[in-house]
Amino acid sequence: MAWVAGRVTGLVTGRAWRASCALGLVVPVLVLPMLVLPLAAPVDAGPVAGCRVFPASSWWHASVRRLPVHARSRAWLRTIGTSGELHPDFGRNAGGVDYGIPVTVVSRRHPRVRVRFTYAGESDRVRYPLGRDTMIEGGRGSRGDRHAIVVDRSACRLYETWATRKVHGRWRAGSGAVWSLRSNALRPDGWTSADAAGLPMLPGLLRWREVRANRLDHALRFTAPVTRRAHLWPARHDAGSTLSRSAPPMGARFRLRSSYDASDLGLYARRVVRAMKTYGLVLADNGSAWYVQGERNPHWPARLVADLKTIPASAFVGVDTSSL
């Protein structure tokens, strides 16, 4: 979900959740050069269609296992809430479109289109490889966030939009952002993306193939209902509802306590637990408490989803990432 300049611009994680934001930003408009992009193809072997999702030196791949607990960890946890459990926001949905955010992979032959953005001043205004093959979170008739994530496998370039829809034959979105998956370059400070934190979404999604292959080597994105009007590097944007330091800022990182016992969980869940102890979770958007996002994939094992729902929120701690 994209939150910009003092207003809530949609629903979070496809749920009917709203909040208010009193942040005002004046940001210069940056027009990026047009990119030569690439018909959708199935995801190949490799991290995502053969493209590594950001370099090994990326913050997303940094271990936080040995970093100190943040001085405000307890306050952050109280604000988010610790009485519930982790909620995997992906998996099968018997009543409709499966949960999770789909990833569309395209080739260089894919047509490129103009997109009209609600928040053009903080969007990358290039042509996007959108079309009839573009998968949208919740489906095209969704009233939720309608995120679209597209990977150009030829150039290893990532395109993400929020509130994605087609109106009278023309593509529109709340905001859009483009990244090279081969670079650690960040967006201008103060700019949103398809996420409130101004970060890319793809690197924070749990993906079935990496769990199955035991290649999970990155942090996972999650949401919280109350956040502070501040952001921690490398987050570039915030959309909080309070100035209180007891509320976590965008970009805050959490990890599962090393003492958490996952011996009763299944193999796949234990792999995710190991990743949450090593790489942790990243606060990337406003939404329901402890909702962890994953890709939309019909192969998610029901046992894995059920196991993750048993992990208590109280088993996490906030991490001091200032050394990163």
Image (spheres, rainbow, N blue to C red):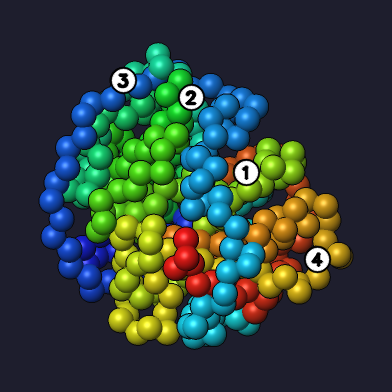
| Mark 2 touches mark 4? (CB < 8 Å) | no
Please tell me the numbered disc located at residue 207: 1
- The Cα–Cα distance between marks 4 and 1, rounded to whole angstroms, is 20 Å
Q: Which residue is mark 4?
A: 262
Where in the figure is residue 172, as x and y percent of width and height? 27, 39
SS class, disc 2: loop
Q: Residue at x 44, y 68 (%)?
A: 322
Q: Is residue 16 visible?
A: no
Where in the figure is residue 22, as x and y percent of width and height? 23, 73
- The Cα–Cα distance between marks 1 and 2, rounded to whole angstroms, is 17 Å
| Mark 1 touches mark 2? (CB < 8 Å) | no
Q: Amino acid at mark 4?
A: Ala
Does residue 191 lie above or below 33 as drawn? below
Q: Residues within 10 Å of mark 1 (few under 14, many from 20)?
A: many
Q: Which residue is mark 2?
A: 153
Q: Residue at x 31, y 20 (%)?
A: 36
Residue 200 is left or right of residue 165, and the answer is right
Q: Residue at x 50, y 61 (%)?
A: 282
- The quadrant the N terminus occupies is bottom left
Where in the figure is residue 271, as x and y percent of width and height? 75, 53
Q: Amino acid at mark 1?
A: Arg
Question: Which of the 4 quarters of the picture holds residue 247?
Answer: bottom left
Sooner in the amino-acid sequence: mark 4 or mark 1? 1
Where in the figure is residue 106, as x and y percent of width and height? 46, 23
SS class, disc 4: loop
Q: Residue at x 24, y 31 (%)?
A: 126
